[in-house]
Image: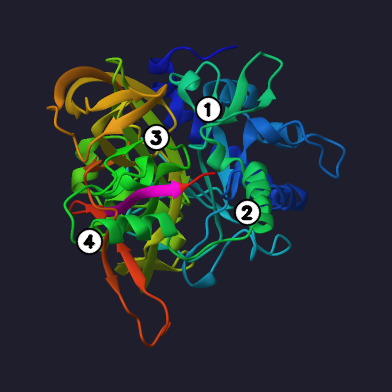
Amino acid sequence: MEINSTTFFNQSDSQAKTHFAKGLAQAISQEKHIREFIKYEALKTFDGDYDVPYSLVKDKLLPNGKTFQQSLAPYFKEVSLKDIEQSLPLLTIFVPTLPEKTFSAELWDTENQVPYIAIRLNDSNDVPIISPEGEEYLLESSLVPSYPVLVVKNCERLVYSSQQGYQFSNGSRVILTTPAGISYKFADDIFDFELQKQKELDALREGTVSTTDSKLVDAYSQYLTADGWQRDFIYYDITPTSPNGQFTFDFSEHIRSFSIVGDALLAYQKMADQSGDPKIKSGKKSSGWTDGYFEIRASVLIQAQNGIGSTIPNSYLVSGRDLFSVTYEVDRRGVWPFRYDYYIVKSVTAKPQSTNMPIVPWDLKNYGASFRVDIEETDVTTIVTESTSETTKFATNFSIEGQVLKKIGLKFGASLERTETNTITRQYTLNSDPLGSVVVNFSDKVIVSASYPVLEAPQTWRYNTREYANDIFSISVEPKRVQ
């Protein structure tokens, strides 16, 4: 059965999760091998997080000789487990990492610890909790539990074939096709843990280079005192004394770093906010512990000379643990015997991240002289498109010399640039948290300054690349050698 009705899915989402959570709470309290199975699957981090997507594991055998689905089924009385499966194609059991090493997939003692069950809702930041004894209560969004808990949620790192935007996802392989014909794949290859492990191995074989590429340094030196564009030298070998050059594909633009600037606590709360309702987002605190690692997505809007505007979507993995350093204060809540310690976020410090997101080899013959980078933190995988009008400048100073197409002159040359307004198709995800946009120009300096760090490396210059920032984030965009 294919779920094509978005309305039906949204209306039944919270109710279906609640039914599943109640049955799961009974099952894990009664059967240790179910707890062991969930921990075992979570530790695989198949999508880079401690997610256990139900559709991908429901037919796996447990030590009792039954499948995971068969083992859970007896605990569902009000609504059948199969009905829940059909309502929630992305149903997932998530094992959170809680503060101060109070609970995680690695630390879970399945012999003695029976977790509570939390429910991640789409229409509220507060978190329904079901205890092993079946009691239900609502946890304030500002509180993080200190006791073992599993989370019932939708997996934001997978997409399924009847989902809106499935055809736009960047996942390169189908990982499961159900008997009903529903196919699953990753929203992006960055979440494909097996693929990423192979890329890491390849990178280790190739080795790493921590120094600034010599071509970028030469471009900085060429135009340190002369008027001109560093990217002219990087892409065309153009210098003040040799103003004509052929395009080289040795380099491609990349986003090389990402960091949160300004008030890190406000940024953390904005990104960790789980609700799909903007009205709730503006008035509530976050309960981001129910979602795991942050997913930061960048979309690059760039215009081509043929009049077609395109979006270059990409995603990369930034975890809450790596993106922020968070300190907590303890708050004891409840009445005995249900009195527990909870954590409240006290302070947040941002930590810069290295990234490696490819954009395009920037040939001014084919692309405009500027592009826009949109950054968002995504909470769901439903991708939608919209068309917008964008204006940009195009270089016209190109000529064929001896059957070789060359850029003629520094900058835009003697001829005037051409300004055009075209329609660009942009992709974004539903219920995402937009963090803002920046514009990158071909004329911008790549390296903006050099310093001589005597203490760190007495014989080495440090080169500082340009940052593009708003009041929330900062990124660096620079040409990277690709061949």
Quarter that holds the N terminus: top right
User: Would you name the residue on which mark 1 appears?
Assistant: 159
The residue at the point 26 percent across, 49 percent down is 241
Q: Secondary structure at mark 4?
A: loop
Horizontal and vertical percent for residue 422? Answer: 21, 17
In the displayed structure, 184 sits above or below 469; it is above
Q: Secondary structure of the magenta portion, mostly? A: strand
Work out how far the residue at label 3 is from the one at label 2, CA to CA, in angstroms: 27 Å
- Residue plotted at (38% across, 30% down): 312
Marks 3,2: beta carbons within 8 A: no
Circle 3 or circle 1, nearest the eye: 3
For label 3, the residue is 247
Secondary element at image label 2: helix
Callout 1: SS = strand
| Badge 1 or badge 4: first in the primary sequence | 1
Residue range of the region highlighted in magenta in the rendering: 474-480
Cα–Cα span, label 2 and label 1: 28 Å
Q: In the picture provided, is 354 more to the left or to the right than 304?
A: right
Q: Which residue is mark 2?
A: 203
Is 184 placed left or right of 239 in the picture? right
Q: Nearer the viewer, mark 2 or mark 1?
A: 2
Query: Which numbered disc, 3 or 1, marks the residue that appears first in the sequence?
Result: 1
Q: Quadrant of the C terminus?
A: top right
- Separation of marks 1 and 4 at Cα, in angstroms: 49 Å
Element on which disc 3 rests: loop
Alpha-carbon span between mark 3 and mark 1 = 39 Å
The amino acid pointed to by label 1 is: Val
At x 32%, y 40%, the residue is 275
Q: Nearer the viewer, mark 1 or mark 4?
A: 4
Q: Position of residue 197 (x, y in %)?
A: 66, 49
Colouring mode (rainbow / by chain / secondary structure / one colour):
rainbow
The numbered mark at residue 224 is 4
